[in-house]
Image (spheres, rainbow, N blue to C red):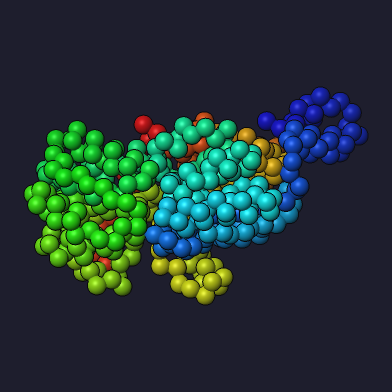
Amino acid sequence: MTAFSKKTLVSVVAVAAATALALSGCSASSKYTGGDGVLKLGGVLPLTGALAFLSPPEIAGVELAIQDINDAGGVLGKPVEWSLEDSSDGDHPEVAPASATKLLDGGVDAIVGAAASGVTRLIIDQVTKAKTVQISMSNTAPDLSTWDDGGYYFRTAPSDLLQGAIVGNQVVADGHENVAIIYQQTPYGEGLEAKAKATIEAAGATIVSDLSFPEAETNFDTIVQKTVASGADSVLIISYDEFKKIAPALQKNNFPGKDMYLVDGNLANYSAEGFASYLEGAKGTLPGGKLDEAFKQRAADLYKANHNEDLTEFAYLAESYDAVILLALAAEQAGNDSGQAISENLQSVSTGGEAVTDYAAGLAAIKAGKDVDYNGFSGPIEFDENGDPTGASIGIYQYGKDGTSTLLDVVAGNSVE
C-alpha cells in the first residue's frame, strides 16, 4: 500500500533500514504537489439563515474530532488547524462563495460543509476546481453524486434516495392513503420530494396535493388551505426553518398534528415554540442511527466550554465528527496534507483494511504500515467512487407533547440506489 512497504521488500542491507524508512516518507509526500505539513481545515457552515439550528451540532462534531486528533498526536506530527466561516442559506447566495474564497485564499486543504445541498451548489465548483477537498456532513441531494467535481467532493450523509424511500414507506405503513406534500423549491426539497412521492405511490397510496414554496417563505396560509381542502389524511413537510410557520398554519386549520411527517431539514427541538404540544405523535426521519450517549456528552461538554452555550441539537453531530477524522486519516496515510493527497486516499481509509473506530487506532495502524477501514459514529461510511457513503442508516423519530422527538427505530439501507 505504501512506498515504505515496497522499499523494505527490496532492501537487502540491514544497515540501510533506517535510511529506507526515511526515504519512504519522502516518497509518499513527493507523489503529490502542494502540502505544507499542516492540515488546515475550513468550515462553511450556517451560522445564520434557515439552517442555523444545525450549526451547533456540526461545529461541535468538528471541534471534538480536532481535539481527539490533536490529543493523539495530530496529523503528520502537527496539530490540525481550523477556521470557520458562515454559509447562511439559499436566500443569501452571496455569503457562501465569499466565505469559500476567504478560506481558499487562506490555504485550507479541505472545506467542511456546506450544510445545505443548495448552498453547496454555490461553492462546489469554486472549491473542487481549486483542487481542495469539500466534504459535507449533511448534503443529501441525489444529483451531487454525479457532480463533475474531479473527485474532490465527498459527503458522510446518505443521498435522499434513501431518506425519501424510508419516510415515504413510513407514511404508508402508518395506514395513510391520501398524502399531501409541502416541499421547499430547492435542490434539497425537490430531490427528496421526488423520491418520497415515487415511494408513496408505488406503495399504493395517492398523492392528493403536492405544493412547493420558495426557500425562506413566511406566509403559508394559501398552501395550507389547499392542502387541507385536498382531503389529505397526512402531510409530508420538506423544509428548513419554514416549518415554524407551516405547523401553526396547519394547527389553525385544524389539521391533526399527529399526521405530520418531518425530515432532516426540520426535525428539530421545538420545545420553546407555542405549537410544541401540537406536534405530539408527528414523526420524522434523520440520517444516522442511535448516537452513543458518551459521545454526545463529550461533544456537549466541549461545545459548552468553547462557546458557553448548551448543545441542544444533535443532528449531523456524528457525520461532522466522522468527516474530519476521515480527512485526517487520509492525509496521514498519504503522508501529505494537500487536497490531491486527501482526495486520493479518502476512499481507501473508509473501506477495506484493518477496522478502526477512532483516530488514535487509525494513526497507529497507518504508522505500522497497515491499510485502515474507519467505522465511525455515523456508521461504516465506505465511500464509493462518487464520494457517497454506500451503506447508511436513517432514524425514525416521534414527537412527544413537549415538542421534542425520540428515536423509534433505525432502518439501514443502500444510499445510492
Q: Is residue 41 left or right of residue 22?
A: left
Q: Is residue 238 above or below residue 194?
A: below
For the point 89% across and 33% down, the residue is 16
Outermost residue to the bottom: 308
How many marks on residues? Answer: 0
Give me the residue at 55% from left, 50% from top: 97
Residue 352 in percent (x, y) is at 55, 33
Residue 355 in view (yes/no): no
Residue sitting at 13 percent across and 43 percent down?
208
Give the percent coordinates (x, y) of residue 60. 51, 62
Residue closest to the far right: 15
Q: Nearer the viewer, residue 386 or 13?
A: 386
Q: Position of residue 110 (x, y in %)?
A: 61, 47
- Residue shown at 27% from the left, 67% from the top: 403
Query: 118 and 408: which one is in front?
Result: 118
Q: Quadrant of the N terminus?
A: top right
Q: Is residue 98 above or below residue 157?
A: below
Q: Is residue 88 left or right of residue 30?
A: left
Query: Quadrant of the image for the C terminus?
Result: top left
- For the question of whether residue 369 can be seen, the reply is yes
Identify which residue, 163 or 144, lies in the foreground. Answer: 144
**Vertical order, 374 against 148 (above or below):** below
Name the quadrant containing residue 195. Answer: top left
Q: Position of residue 21 (x, y in %)?
A: 82, 37
**Picture quadrant where residue 218 is located:** bottom left
Q: Nearer the viewer, residue 379 or 234?
A: 234
